[in-house]
């Protein structure tokens, strides 16, 4: 799994890490049951603090995409597969919203209201 960050970005490193994992799931490069690199291993390879990686993994856990297991590390959940499946629908929805001239803010509001 290729996880990338941009130290010059204004986006916090932990969010970049979490976003990179999400992108790997959406691209099909990571699937449910796959293990993420250990926090120490990833921190060392990216030259970031291990707590930054743990924060990213906890964010993914809170989203239901990762299960943190003592001794086994971070493992992608079945929900990660569901999210990947949903990505195709989201892509189509965004394309249709663009075609109709709906702004990203309006689309976000419509989705949020429908979700409630």
Image (tube, grey):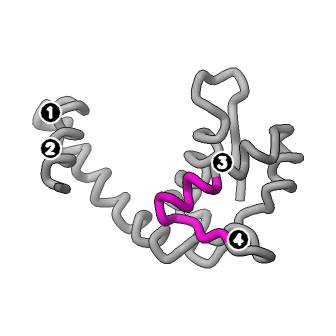
Check disc 3 and report its element: helix, strand or loop.
Answer: helix
**Tag 4 residue:** 35
From the viewer's perspective, is the residue at label 4 or at label 1 nearer? Answer: 4
**Residue that appears at 14% across and 43% down:** 110
Residue 6, given in percent of the width and then of the height, sits at 69, 30
Check disc 2 and report its element: helix, strand or loop.
Answer: helix
Q: Quadrant of the C terminus?
A: bottom left
From the viewer's perspective, is the residue at label 4 or at label 3 nearer? Answer: 3
Find residue 35 and report its image quarter.
Answer: bottom right
From the viewer's perspective, is the residue at label 2 or at label 1 nearer? Answer: 2
Q: CA distance from mark 3 to mark 1?
A: 34 Å
Residue 17, given in percent of the width and then of the height, sits at 65, 45
**Disc marking residue 7:** none
Q: Earlier in the sequence, mark 4 or mark 2?
A: 4
Q: Earlier in the sequence, mark 2 or mark 3?
A: 3
**Tag 1 residue:** 102
**Tag 3 residue:** 55
From the viewer's perspective, is the residue at label 2 or at label 3 nearer? Answer: 3
Check disc 4 and report its element: helix, strand or loop.
Answer: loop
**Tag 2 residue:** 110
Q: CA distance from mark 2 to mark 1?
A: 10 Å
Q: Residues within 10 Å of mark 1 (few under 14, many from 20)?
A: some
**Residue that appears at 70% across and 49% down:** 3
Magenta region = 57-68
From the viewer's perspective, is the residue at label 3 or at label 1 nearer? Answer: 3
Residue 10, given in percent of the width and then of the height, sits at 59, 22
Q: Earlier in the sequence, mark 4 or mark 1?
A: 4
**Disc 4 vs disc 2: Cβ atoms closer than 8 Å?**
no
**Residue that appears at 16% across and 33% down:** 106
């Amino acid at each position: 799994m290729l996880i990338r960050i941009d130290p010059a970005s204004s986006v916090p490193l932990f969010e970049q890490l979490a976003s990179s994992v999400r992108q790997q799931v959406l691209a099909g490069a990571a699937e449910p049951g796959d293990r993420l690199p250990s926090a120490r291993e990833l921190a060392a390879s990216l030259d970031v603090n291990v707590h930054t990686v743990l924060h990213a993994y906890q964010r993914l856990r809170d989203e239901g995409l990762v299960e943190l297991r003592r001794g086994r590390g971070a493992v992608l959940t079945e929900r990660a597969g569901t999210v990947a499946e949903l990505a195709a629908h989201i892509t189509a929805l965004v394309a249709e919203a663009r075609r109709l001239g709906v702004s990203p803010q309006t689309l976000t509001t419509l989705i949020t209201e429908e979700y409630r």
